[in-house]
Amino acid sequence: MNDRPVKVSPDDYAPAFSSRQRENIEWSTTYAYNATDDTLPRVLLIGDSICNAYQGRVRELLDGRMNVSFWASSKCVTDPDYFRELDFILDERPYGSITFNNGLHSLNSDRTEWTAAYRAAVAFIRAKLPRAELFLMLSTPLKDEKLTVVSAELNETVKKIAEERSLPIIDLFSPMDGLDRERYWSDTFHFSPEAVGIQAELIALCLTGEDGSGAV
């Protein structure tokens, strides 16, 4: 049900160098709900502030079926510290499922560096939790059309890596991109509660296999 983490060194996967400048404020937030309950499958949601927004609604939708942990961070996968934090989160407890996203804080990252680091992060997660169901999550579109184009380009790389590793995808880009920017966005990056609810429902459906994917 839940996969216990294998001891793997993050230094064997983390990039040795990143040309990306860190943001003025870097942050990480992690919660493990029902932390003492091992009777249900546990899902780990990995992302950024978009993840921080939908995690509460995902938890409500999965209540009684899955326990939820999440890690939301501003760090880009090109930052070696990302892997050290990821290692700590993955070691925290066994997980049955993981959803992985790293995109919106990577819009200005060097594309070659980001692609290599993203691929390494996926490999690191698989090495640490080889039996957990891993979903690669497409980044959301933005209110700004030019930035949406960049998000879409990053998502194409994610799709390619998912195909290489035969991993399922959770697509939060396509359903959001057709929505009214004035109604469903609260700022350039973030969404109204209604849109967050749509995202959470899509994630819950994928995690339970009720989207037809067959996941459990």
Image (spheres, rainbow, N blue to C red):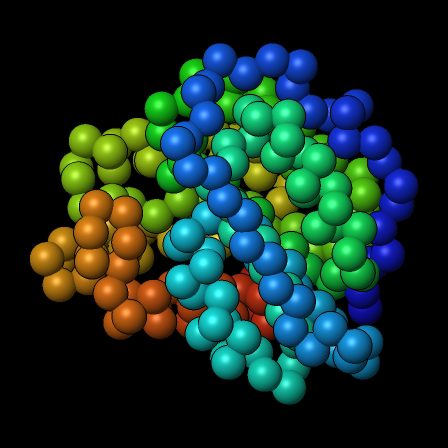
Left/right placement of residue 207 relative to residue 145 reads right
Residue farthest along the bottom direction in this orientation: 64
**Which image quarter: residue 155?**
top left
Q: Is residue 198 above or below residue 79?
A: below
Out of 203 and 70, give the one closest to the viewer.
Answer: 70
Left/right placement of residue 154 relative to residue 89 reads left
Left/right placement of residue 36 relative to residue 178 reads right
Q: Is residue 79 above or below residue 163?
A: above
* Residue found 54% across the figure and 16% down from its top: 18
Is residue 200 among the parts visible in the rendering?
A: yes
Q: Is residue 198 above or below residue 129?
A: below
**Which image quarter: residue 57?**
bottom left
Quadrant (top left/top right/bottom left/bottom right) for the N terminus: bottom right
* Residue found 46% across the figure and 19% down from its top: 20
Residue farthest along the right direction in this orientation: 7
Q: Is residue 84 above or below residue 175?
A: above
Looking at the image, how many numbered discs can be counted on the residues? 0
Is residue 164 among the parts visible in the rendering?
A: no
Image location (x, y in percent) of residue 148: 25, 37
Image location (x, y in percent) of residue 182: 10, 57
* Residue found 40% across the figure and 62% down from its top: 53
Image location (x, y in percent) of residue 52: 46, 59
* Residue found 79% across the figure and 77% down from its top: 36
Out of 48 and 148, give the one closest to the viewer.
Answer: 48
Image location (x, y in percent) of residue 43: 66, 64
Residue farthest along the front direction in this orientation: 24
Quadrant (top left/top right/bottom left/bottom right) for the C terminus: bottom right
